[in-house]
Image (cartoon, rainbow, N blue to C red):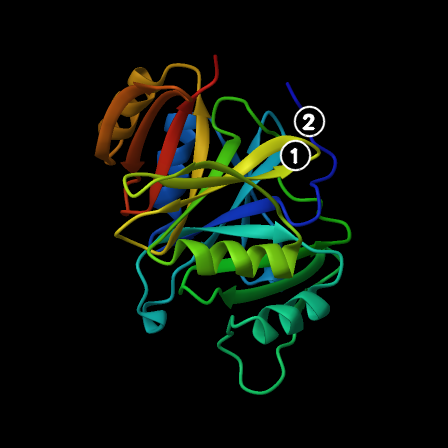
């Protein structure tokens, strides 16, 4: 099992699910991926850590109806200074919900969290780790394998993340039909940005030993299929939603 002890700066480091029914979500992901769960403790507001083979893979928290947002997965990018990154993001055209100068939130002794929207409106988190190193399992069944931002304002998004997070961008295609770039970390493409007439949206890809069987598990446990499984140059992929409607993608591991 590949165990990751650190994420490159600027790369995805953590994911969590905001769920209107946390118990139902635990049942769903436990059945589909075999995740187990442990409460972070009362001082963390009911936050729950999901584990794959005993290693942190994701988080779950309650979606307060007052927030008036759908259940969703959030991607967090690694920063070594959350305050400085928030300031840089706002200066580059991003924005936060907080009034006044943006400030990260200290999460006990685990790290510092920040939340922002990029200039195209895509919502993304920041994580500055201390004790909590982020997800420690990658490229396994039920673990993150890839991330993708889809946006109508492709060029604006690339410039923002290049400026704020120092992404090394590689253009995959730049035609009217398909505009796509990857951000490479130590030569490895860990995420992509795609021009699409929808979104903006950050999406996580979770690995599946067998995509078709996992799609069936999703259906058997109250989820739905957004896009049927299909073979692509990047493996067999499918887009699904969980039992409360939060979307994610499946990616083959072979």
* Vertical relation: 158 (above or below) 95: above
Q: Name the residue located 60 percent from the left edge and 61 percent from the top edge.
A: 44
Would residue 104 be seen by someone viewing this image from the given angle?
Answer: no
- 214 displayed left or right of 205: left
Residue 57 in the image: x percent, y percent? 57, 37
Q: Are marks 2 and 1 in contact (CB under 8 Å)?
A: yes
Q: Name the residue located 50 percent from the left edge and 74 percent from the top edge.
A: 95
Tag 2 residue: 3
Would residue 100 be seen by someone viewing this image from the given angle?
Answer: yes
Tag 1 residue: 136
For label 1, the SS is: loop
Asked where in the image residue 24 lies, by quadrant, the reply is top left
Assess disc 1: are there few (<14), some (14-19) or many (≥20) residues with their C-alpha within 10 Å of its C-alpha.
Answer: many
Residue 141 in the image: x percent, y percent? 48, 22
* Vertical relation: 155 (above or below) 38: below
Q: Name the residue located 77 percent from the left edge and 53 percent from the top edge.
A: 130
Q: Name the residue located 55 percent from the left edge and 63 percent from the top edge.
A: 45
- 252 displayed left or right of 39: left
> Which one is in front, 117 or 74?
117
Q: Residue furthest front?
A: 175
Assess disc 2: are there few (<14), some (14-19) or many (≥20) residues with their C-alpha within 10 Å of its C-alpha.
Answer: few
Asked where in the image residue 194 lies, by quadrant, the reply is top left
């Amino acid at each position: 099992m590949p165990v990751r002890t650190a994420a490159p700066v600027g790369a995805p480091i953590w994911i969590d699910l905001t769920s209107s029914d946390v118990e139902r979500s635990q049942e769903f992901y436990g059945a589909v991926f075999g995740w187990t769960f442990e409460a972070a403790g009362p001082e963390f507001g009911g936050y729950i850590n999901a584990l794959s083979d005993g290693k942190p893979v994701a988080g779950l928290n309650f979606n307060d109806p007052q927030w008036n947002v759908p259940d969703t997965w959030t991607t967090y990018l690694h920063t070594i200074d959350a305050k400085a990154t928030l300031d840089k993001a706002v200066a580059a055209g991003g924005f936060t919900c907080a009034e006044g100068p943006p400030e990260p939130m200290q999460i006990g002794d685990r790290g510092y969290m920040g939340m922002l929207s990029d200039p195209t409106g895509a919502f993304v988190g920041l994580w500055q780790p201390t004790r909590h190193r982020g997800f420690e399992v990658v490229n396994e069944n039920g673990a993150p394998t890839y991330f993708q931002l889809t946006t109508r304002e492709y060029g604006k998004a690339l410039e923002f993340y290049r400026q704020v997070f120092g992404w090394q961008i590689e253009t995959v295609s730049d035609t009217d039909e398909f505009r796509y770039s990857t951000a490479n970390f130590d030569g490895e493409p860990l995420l992509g940005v795609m021009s699409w007439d929808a979104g903006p949206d950050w999406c996580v890809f979770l690995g599946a030993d067998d995509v078709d069987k996992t799609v069936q598990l999703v259906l058997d446990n109250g989820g739905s299929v957004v896009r049927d499984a299909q073979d692509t140059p990047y493996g067999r992929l499918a887009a699904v939603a969980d039992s409360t409607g939060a979307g994610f993608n499946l990616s083959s591991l072979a």
